[in-house]
Amino acid sequence: MAKKKKGLGRGLGALISSTAATDHPDELAMQPDEPAGPRLLLLNPRDLRPNPKQPRMTFDEEALEELSESIKRDGVQEPVIVRQADDGYELVSGERRVRAAVMADLETIPAVCREVSDADMLKLGLIENIQREDLNPIELARGYRQLIDEFEWTQEELADQVGKKRATVTNTLRLLNLPEVVQARVADGSIAMGHARALLALDSPQEQIAACRKIVSQGLSVRQVEKLASREGASPKPAVPKDPNITAIEDELRRKLGTKVALRTSEKTRGKIEIEYFNLDELDRLLGLIRSIR
C-alpha cells in the first residue's frame, strides 16, 4: 500500500489532481501558457521565512497544540499566503498554521503565492489577525500604529481599512499611552481591556502602575477601577473653551506626527508645543519625522 501523502487538507486535495501533486510538488496551479498571477504551491513549512512585519508577538502554545492536532487529523484546510523572495518564499499571512504544521511534522503545506509589496506586508498580516481575533489588545494597538505610520492614514481612514468603528480604533491606540509594565499586563491577559481604559483616566504613570498592581493582587472589577480612578482624579477644574484655531493646529500636527500634540499659549505671541511619546522607539520615530522636515 502506498504511503499516504501528508500535508493537504481533504477539501483542497479534491481540487488538485493526483498527477499534479506527484509530478509538480512545488507548483500546482500555474501552467506554462497561463498569465502570471497567484499560484498554488506545496511548500515545506520549515523553509518559509516569517513575515518581518508580523504584528503578532506571542503565540499561545496550548492553542497551537490544538491546531496541530486538528491538522494531523484533517490536514491544512486553508492555504497560507506567501510571496517570492530572493532565496525562497516569505510568509505574508498564516504563521499560526505554519507553526502548527511544523509541530504536526508535515512535510508540505498548501500556499498561495502572490505579488505583495513591502508596504502591504503589514496590512495583510494585521487584517488577517484582526479578522481571526488572534491578537491581544497591545499587539493590535501596535499594529494600528504601524499602519498609521507607514501609510500616513488618519484614524478614520485606518478604521475604514480594517473594518472597525473609529471609536474602537481610537480606544485601542490609547493603550499605547500606558506605561510598558501595564501594557505587559494587558498583553498577557492579567487585566482586561476595560481595566486598561479605566487606568487611562489616572493622571500619572505611577498612579496607573499602582492601580494595575491592585487589579492583579485584589481582583478588582472594571467598575471598581473606574471608581478608584474618579477618586484619584479629584475635583477637576472647569474646562475652559479652547480657541478653535488652536484646536485646528493641534489636529493637523496630530495627524502628521501620529501622536498627541498640545499647544500651550501664555501670551498672544508666545507659547510652546508639547509632543507626546510613550517609549524610546516612539521618540526615535518622532525625531526622524522632525529631522526630515525641510
Image (cartoon, grey):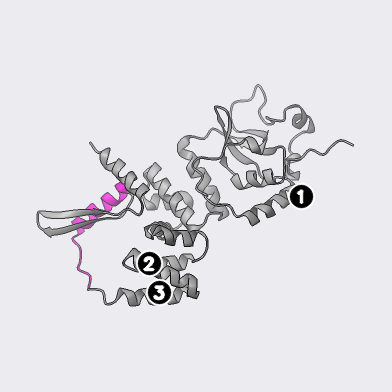
Rendered location of residue 108, percent (x, y): 70, 37
Region rendered in magenta: 238-257
User: What is the quadrant of residue 7 in the picture?
Assistant: top right
Q: Is residue 59 left or right of residue 175?
A: right
Element under disc 2: helix
Camera-side mark, 2 or 3: 2
Residue 169 in magenta?
no
Q: Are marks 1 and 2 in contact (CB under 8 Å)?
A: no
At 66% from the left and 47% from the top, the residue drawn is 100
Q: Nearer the viewer, residue 9 or 17?
A: 9
Rendered location of residue 180, percent (x, y): 41, 57
- C-alpha gap between disc 2 and disc 3: 12 Å
Question: Which numbered marker is on residue 226?
Answer: 3
Labels 1 and 3: the sequence-earlier one: 1
What's the residue type where badge 1 is placed? Answer: Arg
* Neighbours of disc 2 within 10 Å: few (<14), some (14-19), many (20+): many
What's the residue type where badge 3 is placed? Answer: Glu
The residue tagged 1 is 73
Q: Nearer the viewer, residue 279 or 29?
A: 279
Labels 2 and 3: the sequence-earlier one: 2
User: What is the quadrant of residue 82 in the picture?
Assistant: top right
Question: Which numbered marker is on residue 208?
Answer: 2
At 75% from the left and 40% from the top, the residue drawn is 13
Q: Is residue 98 left or right of residue 154?
A: right
